[in-house]
Amino acid sequence: MKNNFSKRINSLQTSATMEIAARVIELKSNGTDLIDLGVGEPDFPTPEHIKLAAKRALDIDKTKYTLNVGTLELRDAIAKKLYNDNHLEYKSSDIIVSAGAKQSLFNAIQVLINEGDEVIVPIPTYVSYIQMINFAGGKAVIIPTDESTSFKLSPDKLSEHITPKTKMLVLCNPSNPTGAVYSPDELKNLAEVSNEQNIYVVSDEIYEKLIFDDLQIRSIASLDENIKRRTVVVNGFSKSYSMTGWRIGYAAADGEIIKNMAKLQSHSTSNASSISQEAALEALTASQDIVEFMRNKFEIRRDFIYKEINLIPGLSALKPSGAFYLFTNVSQLLNKQFRKHIFKTTSDLILYLLDEARVSTVPGSAFGLENYIRISYAASFDHLEEGVGRIKTAINKLLA
Ligand SMILES: Cc1ncc(COP(=O)(O)O)c(C=O)c1O
């Protein structure tokens, strides 16, 4: 049948992680005893006081439309958070609340990217940026990074890829899927190039609270007024507060950019859920102890999985500094004849781990880089121990 769908929708590819998530759901519904180390959401329940705030919102009928850009109370709280945590001064009119950070990313890219504009995307990276750029008619200029720079973009590589058509750089800091965190100096060097070349930066900081080893994280926008003017800071509640299903994220930027993002959002989803906004307000204004509690658990798991995975023959991984993923090099297991198996791609290996170990992970190709798998440690310690044990057994079986 002739494809009658728009050029825009045909430019999109289905999210590979979503496909695997669907397969995992199918296996689980068949009763398969599966250890899910594939998904990108904290295993913790949403904290009790946040759930109570949502219940309160229902009881007092905060169930109507809010301002399209989000309630003033929530945007004021976000402005305060950005000032206190990130040394960033924004007015509430420089902030928009969306249905997840994803919607803020989508809006920012739609608002700033014209047909043919080039957007620099260091890979491996979060699956959706490239599709969002395609949807806007832009061209994603992919810059591969590797272990030698801990998967971080260098200012030289950035400069090399800038052309007169370059409009934007997308940075994910801390990174999904590598857990890399840029140091303030590294950010300063990237900001200098961006300033010189007058390009926008979309800075996805959704894993900002999940950093380890007492690292201090900076937002690139906080380095100077010039870079701040051209940066859209994106953040949200999904990861830090274990609120993935509540769909609340936000963007902070120059007021004119936000005004245009609001225009777009007003014709698509209007405001984010009023109840979720009340819950997010509570998340920001109450004690932050629970965030530290969860961060600390992630650090303990990071230490465990980093050590254990590196002990398995054929697997190796750099120590992640943030987020909750171990980006694991599996190149030694590819294109090699084992007794019964040969894995031509990481997806073949992922399927082997699904069938043999009943452990789900995500192929690096879903983030733009073959030869790696992403193992999420957003799972309980018991699950992690069991999952790692199963992976070890399955790999040892290959090598036996
Ligand atoms: C890097 C990154 N940005 C954005 C998102 C989307 O977050 P949200 O749930 O707020 O839409 C995710 C979710 O996995 C992510 O990993």
Image (cartoon, rainbow, N blue to C red):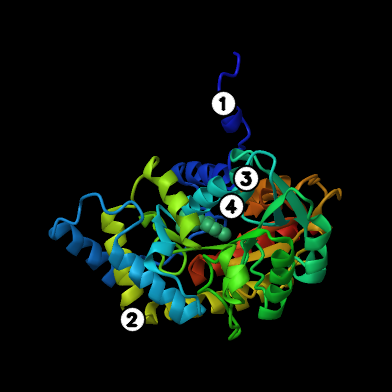
Q: Which residue is mark 4?
A: 358
Instruction: Indicate if the residue with disc 1 has its beta carbon within 8 Å of ligand 1.
Output: no
Q: Which residue is mark 1?
A: 6
Residue 225 in picture, x, y percent from top left:
58, 73
Q: Choose the circle earlier in sequence order: 1 or 3.
A: 1
Q: Choose the circle earlier in sequence order: 2 or 4.
A: 2
C-alpha distance separating marks 2 and 3: 37 Å
Q: Dot 2, crowdedness within 10 Å: few (<14), some or many (≥20)?
A: few
Residues at circles 2 and 3 in contact by the CB criterion of under 8 Å: no
Residue drawn at the location 58% of the way across and 83% of the way down: 216
| Quadrant the C terminus occupies | bottom right
Query: How many discs appear?
Result: 4
C-alpha distance separating marks 1 and 3: 16 Å
Disc assigned to residue 306: none
Q: Secondary structure at mark 1?
A: loop
Instruction: Indicate if the residue with disc 2 has its beta carbon within 8 Å of ligand 1.
Output: no
Q: Choose the circle earlier in sequence order: 1 or 4.
A: 1
Q: Between residues 273 and 97, which one lies in front from this camera angle?
A: 97
Q: Comparing marks 4 and 3, which lies closer to the viewer?
A: 3
What type is the residue that disc 1 sits on?
Ser
Q: Which residue is mark 3?
A: 133
Disc assigned to residue 287: 2
